[in-house]
Amino acid sequence: MKQTPSPRCALDVSTNADLHCHSRVSDGTLQPEELARRAKTQGVELWALTDHDEVGGQQRALDTALSLDLPYLTGVEISVSFAGRVVHIVGLGFEHQNPALIEGLRNTRGGREPRAREMAAGLAQVGIKGAFEGALKFVGNPELISRTHFARFLVESGHCSDVSEVFRRYLTEGKPGYVEHRWAKLSDALRWIHEAGGQAVIAHPARYAFTPTEEYALITEFMGHGGRGIEVVTGSHSAAEAIKYTETALEFDLYASRGSDFHSPEESRVDLGRLDGLSGRLKPIWELLRDRIHWPR
Ligand code: AMP
Ligand code: MN
Ligand code: MN
Ligand code: MN
């Protein structure tokens, strides 16, 4: 008897996977359900919602994705302090009810409110009043007030014309609204992800402005803690950066990931599912996560 191939076998390097985006649960503007519908409409074939430091949107994303016949991987983007910089680690395919992961993320979020008050004080010194309250109006989850919410307030109040200008003028190192913060440790973030059954991925490696030596240290330390993935094609990389990190993934024998880093229809450069493909020379991270995918019935 002729067998129809199971859709579970259809994944390969050319799959339209989008494994990085944000909802209102962190600093995106759409709800998890709206993102699931948008991913489906845009042709995504394997999806993960990766809110910053929070898994509270996972069940909603999972339920909606499966109802739309869209395979789903759980996701999170964890803020980590490494060598005096902030590095983002994406976790994929973990058990989203894992208590140690939930508790670790809660502790990571804990510093955001005092940091936001300090950011507002810095902005007040250059004449921008009421930024804490202003940013809060854009926040879906008060524990996750972020620079993005300040940026939206500064655009709304006419101080800047778009969020990129806000980051450039006010929210990056050395600027009045920038406050240094200690996030999770790399080793903790990887332990939480691995103990919950998932895999870790270095998010948008080109964004850290590391020297080659610092980047080597990040990758080797990450791999030393069992990390196996790196983002190659992302909305946060140029085409040239994707080529560079294709070679990096091959050099270190890392699995490659792909994700738009979509936050908002108005602000994001790349929409869900509208990314270049991974090079056929790469091993996609979803190969490693095959058993962790939630498949529609
Ligand atoms: P936070 O976690 O509060 O430090 O905020 C970091 C978030 O700010 C990132 O997740 C991005 O969404 C956003 N972001 C960082 N740099 C920029 C930039 N140059 N332009 C626009 N958004 C940015
Ligand atoms: Mn963000
Ligand atoms: Mn990021
Ligand atoms: Mn992101």
Image (cartoon, grey):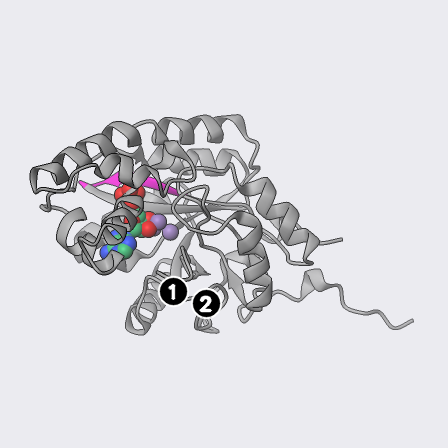
Could you tell me residue 221's position as x and y percent? 30, 43
Query: Left or right: where does residue 256 sit relative to residue 185?
Result: right
Mark yes or no: residue 64 visible.
yes
Label 1–label 2 contact, CB within 8 A: yes
Nearer to us in this view, 177 or 189: 177
Residue linked to disc 2: 282
Residue 71 lies within the magenta run: no
Viewer-nearest residue: 15 or 280? 15
Sequence order check: which comes first, mark 1 or mark 2?
1
Tell me if 140 is positioned left or right of 9 in this view. Answer: left
Report the residue that reaches farthest toward the right.
1
Would you say the beta carbon of the disc 2 residue lies within 8 angstroms of ligand 4? no
Queried on whether the Cβ of the residue with tag 1 lies below 8 angstroms from ligand 3, the answer reads no
Foreground of the two, 40 or 4: 40
Q: Secondary structure at mark 1?
A: helix
Q: Main secondary structure of the magenta part?
A: strand
Identify which amino acid the numbered label 1 is placed on.
Leu
Image quadrant in which you'd find residue 59: top right
Please tell me the numbered disc located at residue 250: 1
Q: Position of residue 265 (x, y in %)?
A: 42, 62
Q: Is residue 80 magenta?
A: yes
Q: Is residue 45 above or below residue 126?
A: below
Tell me the magenta residue range. 77-84
Residue type highlighted by circle 2: Leu
